[in-house]
Image (tube, rainbow, N blue to C red):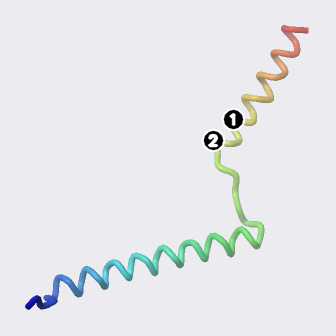
Amino acid sequence: MTTSGPSDRSERGERQNWVERRREKIRAEIDRNRRGDYTVPTWVLALALALIVGGWLALIFLA
């Protein structure tokens, strides 16, 4: 017969607590996005800038 000790209970409680924190973070992010408070990651902006500059350079040197 197996018994659930305190470590089993604390692990389940910790896991449930982690799940609740994760869900709350996701809800908060969705709320921010719905309000329009979202931000574009820096790497996306840098990539867009590099593509624009690269396109202009290609247009100048290949034309």
Q: Amino acid at mark 1?
A: Leu
* The furthest residue to the front: 1
Residue 34 position in % (x across, y down): 75, 72
Q: Say above or below: 61 vs 8.
A: above
Q: Name the residue rendered at 43%, 77% in the picture.
A: 19
- Depth check: give the residue in front, 45 or 20: 20
Residue holding disc 2: 43
Q: Name the residue rendered at 12%, 91% in the picture.
A: 3
Seen in the image, is 19 located left or right of residue 62?
Answer: left
Q: Name the residue rendered at 80%, 29% in the picture.
A: 52
* The furthest residue to the right: 63
What label sits on residue 1 in the rendered view?
A: none
Seen in the image, is 52 located left or right of residue 7?
Answer: right
Q: Quadrant of residue 63?
A: top right
How many other residues sit within 10 Å of disc 1, few (<14), some (14-19) or many (≥20)?
few
Residue 6 position in % (x across, y down): 16, 88
Q: Amino acid at mark 2?
A: Trp
Q: Secondary structure at mark 2?
A: helix
Counting every numbered tag in the picture gives 2
Residue holding disc 1: 47
Residue 27 position in % (x across, y down): 60, 77
Q: Name the residue rendered at 54%, 73% in the picture.
A: 25
Q: Say above or below: 59 vs 40.
A: above
Q: Quadrant of residue 51?
A: top right
Q: Are marks 2 and 1 in contact (CB under 8 Å)?
A: yes
